[in-house]
Image (tube, helix red, strand yellow):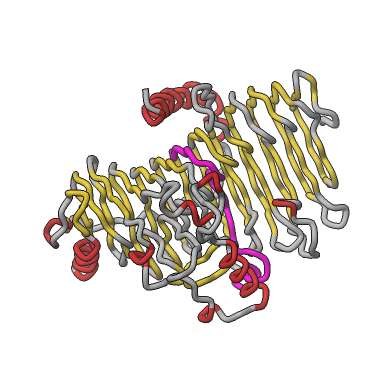
């Protein structure tokens, strides 16, 4: 059986396990209103098949112009659905307009070009928390409202060790000495952000090597991504930026390339992520709000985030906050999360359940984060972590304020290094941490708690013994 087929069998089995394993806790997890749900866009019952505009589903014909014509016609008609029917459809960048649902039908695969020129001209984007004009994300919208990507089809970016991924500059992803890589461009962008260079002057794109995100609504409202499968992204998969009312549900994200984050709300308000299956090599969900001086300049937080009933087959953290969180993050509720055991897939492991990560250069804040009702029978590195030393960062005077974190009803059955690890500084302690109803069955080390003020521990066991300091 192929690795993909085995993963699908395991995914379906794990989905069934979610309902069985968590049914008892779902009622208690529903207590409390949580963040308000975002508004979901609605569309007129008007359909615009891309074949009416010259597209051919043979996997070879360039359908970029046809798709763009269908999007424009749909928008001009007052909104509706741009239909991608069964077939294999080759295209470059797709730019959505207000009122447009890109509907990728079951049996359809959209094959995105691996030619960087297909993502020019450059557009305004955010790359690891710093604003820049760069290659267009593969599906992009700017200042649009009521937009969607839906259906049961596949969006395939075709990233691999020969396309996009070598730009990371790692031999693991196909890079060899003498090949181009992103490090110089990333260093330049960091300097632009630190020096306050006007955003209009921060132009990369052609001749440069910062990989584009897959799906990015930028400065949009009322956004829906539903049902589709995303594969082989160049970079982050679903990356809403400065947007409001974002719903991501019933989506599958499959990517084992570099920086393959699944869903990263970035300075967004009112976001719901539910029933999403993640198989990535990086964080499954990472909540962000800009990086260092540039993030503080923009100053827009991510807040009112709801995460429910997600399945984590592999990745870094199930839920990460940061490391780019200089604009602040607050009011996050994650519940009914399932991290299944997959002994047949060596990449099927999730390092953290909750990872709040920052450096002394970030600033910002993280407040009011709740993660409840977690089933994790497999390996995790550190299930609950707060660190100000992400990626070795130790210098700087802009510590984030981290307060009011809670974890309840976790069952962590597999081995881990530390069950809980919080490493803060005395000058900026982590405040008000509540741990309740947690069971860590196989921890190599005891909990590590440095500079925590207001710790509440109730019914927490590590290797069968109560964690000290319980109330």
For the record, the magenta segment spans: 275-298
Q: Is residue 87 above or below residue 15?
A: below
| Residue 231 horizontal side relative to residue 344, left or right | left
Q: Is residue 275 above or below residue 213?
A: above
**Residue 224 drawn at (x, y percent):** 37, 53
Residue at screen point 47% across, 49% down: 272
Q: Is 280 in the magenta? A: yes
Which quadrant does the C terminus fall into? Answer: top right
Query: Is residue 79 among what the camera can see?
Result: no
170 or 333, which lies in front? Answer: 170
Q: Tell me how many marks there are.
A: 0
| Residue 22 horizontal side relative to residue 417, left or right | left
Which quadrant does the N terminus fall into? Answer: top left
Query: Is residue 176 among what the camera can see?
Result: yes
Q: Is 14 in the magenta? A: no
Q: Residue furthest right?
A: 426
Q: Residue furthest top?
A: 464
Quarter assignment of residue 99: bottom left
**Residue 145 drawn at (x, y percent):** 36, 65
162 or 363, which lies in front? Answer: 162
Residue at screen point 22% across, 59% down: 62
451 or 382, which lies in front? Answer: 382
Residue at screen point 57% across, 59% down: 302
């Amino acid at each position: 059986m192929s690795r993909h087929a085995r993963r699908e069998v395991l995914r379906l089995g794990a989905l069934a396990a979610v309902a069985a394993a968590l049914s008892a806790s779902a009622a208690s997890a529903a207590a409390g209103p949580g963040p308000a749900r975002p508004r979901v866009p609605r569309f007129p019952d008007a359909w615009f098949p891309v074949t009416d505009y010259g597209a051919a589903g043979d996997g070879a014909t360039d359908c970029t112009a046809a798709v763009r014509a269908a999007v424009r016609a749909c928008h001009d008609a007052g909104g509706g659905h741009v239909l991608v029917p069964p077939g294999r459809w080759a295209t470059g960048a797709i730019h959505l307009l207000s009122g447009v649902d890109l509907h990728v039908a079951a049996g359809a695969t959209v094959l995105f070009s691996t030619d960087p020129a297909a993502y020019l001209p450059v557009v305004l984007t955010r790359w690891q928390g710093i604003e820049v004009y760069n290659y267009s994300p593969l599906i992009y919208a700017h200042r649009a409202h009521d937009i969607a990507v839906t259906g049961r089809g596949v969006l395939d970016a075709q990233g691999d060790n020969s396309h996009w991924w070598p730009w990371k500059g790692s031999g693991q992803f196909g890079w060899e000495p003498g090949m181009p890589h992103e490090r110089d461009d990333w260093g330049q962008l960091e300097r632009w952000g630190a020096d306050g260079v006007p955003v209009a002057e921060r132009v990369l794109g052609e001749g440069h090597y910062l990989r584009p995100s897959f799906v990015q609504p930028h400065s949009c409202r009322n956004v829906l991504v539903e049902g589709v499968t995303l594969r082989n992204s160049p970079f982050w998969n679903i990356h809403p930026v400065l947007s409001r009312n974002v719903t991501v549900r019933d989506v599958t994200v499959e990517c084992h390339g570099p920086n393959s984050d699944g869903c990263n709300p970035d300075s967004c308000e009112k976001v719901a992520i539910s029933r999403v299956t993640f198989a990535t090599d990086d964080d499954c969900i990472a909540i962000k709000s800009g990086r260092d001086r540039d993030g503080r300049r923009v100053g827009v937080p991510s807040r009112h985030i709801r995460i429910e009933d997600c399945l984590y087959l592999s990745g870094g953290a199930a839920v990460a906050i940061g490391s780019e969180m200089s604009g602040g993050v607050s009011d996050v509720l994650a519940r009914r999360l399932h991290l299944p055991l997959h002994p047949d897939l060596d990449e099927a492991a999730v390092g953290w359940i909750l990872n709040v990560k920052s450096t002394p250069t970030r600033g910002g804040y993280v407040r009011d984060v709740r993660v409840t009702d977690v089933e994790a029978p497999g390996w995790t590195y550190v299930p609950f972590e707060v660190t100000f030393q992400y990626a070795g960062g130790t210098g700087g005077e802009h510590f984030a304020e981290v307060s009011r974190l809670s974890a309840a009803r976790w069952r962590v059955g597999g081995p881990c290094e530390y069950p809980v690890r919080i490493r803060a500084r005395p000058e900026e302690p982590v405040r008000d941490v509540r741990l309740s109803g947690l069971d860590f069955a196989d921890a190599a080390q005891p909990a590590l708690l440095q500079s925590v003020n207001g710790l509440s521990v109730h019914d927490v066991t590590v290797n069968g013994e109560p964690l000290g300091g319980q109330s």
